[in-house]
Image: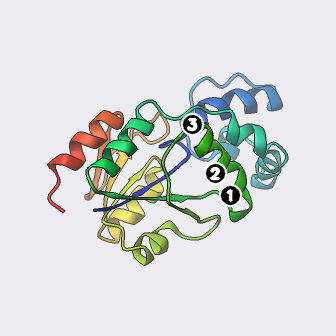
Amino acid sequence: MRIGVDIDGVTSDSYTVWLGELNRYYGKNIEVLEDYHLELVYDVPWDDMNQFFVENVERLFMLPPPMKGAKQGIETLLAKGHEVIYVTARSPEEKDVTLRWMDKYEIPYENIIFAGMKNKVDLVKEWQLELFIEDYAGNAEAIAKSGIQVLLLDSTYNQGELPTGVTRCRNWMQIIKQIEKMKL
């Protein structure tokens, strides 16, 4: 099976680190992210948030550890003959730091698509993915509407009712179990 896997919030425990970094930068004490859109959480213009990430990309992308179970889960998928294709909203300019992070934690990769501002649904279709693992509910819903099954990795910012085609998984162990049950 061709499985798409997001990086931030799925493979990398980015948001935990980003929350601390953003709290320091903006002088806030937000403990729980209840919205995926960080500019809304911190009540700043998107351009300001984007500039913070551009200026601190090395630290923000190298510091987070992998999500618990992600490395082992990806290795399991590959060992079972699945093809893993990462599709990330990171830009092509962030390729080097992303690959260094993957190498640092020995996370296997062959194909990484740096979507930037491109629509993930278009890339999922272009790469003929059969399943997608995502953390952002908006992407999950759009991908599911295109006919691709989505496993949504549970997070504080993606709560709520799920649309048809999206299955919530609490952790990577549950993701692997869900994939084993699928008949795709």
Query: Which residue is label 2 attached to?
Result: 99
Neighbours of disc 3 within 10 Å: few (<14), some (14-19), many (20+): few
Q: Nearer the viewer, residue 95 or 155?
A: 95
Residue 88 percent across, percent down from the top left = 56, 57
Amino acid carrying mark 2 in the image: Leu
Q: Which residue was labeled with disc 3?
A: 105
Image quarter hosting the N terminus: bottom left
Which residue sits at x=26%, y=58%? 165
| Horizontal and vertical percent position of residue 111 | 50, 62
* Residue type, label 3: Tyr
Q: Position of residue 2 (x, y in %)?
A: 33, 64
- Residue visible at 25% across and 58% down? 164
Q: Nearer the viewer, residue 22 or 127?
A: 127
The alpha-carbon separation of the residues under discs 2 and 1 comes to 6 Å
Question: Does 38 sit left or right of 93 as displayed?
Answer: left
Label pair 2/1, CB-CB below 8 angstroms: yes
User: CB atoms at circles 1 and 3 under 8 Å apart?
Assistant: no
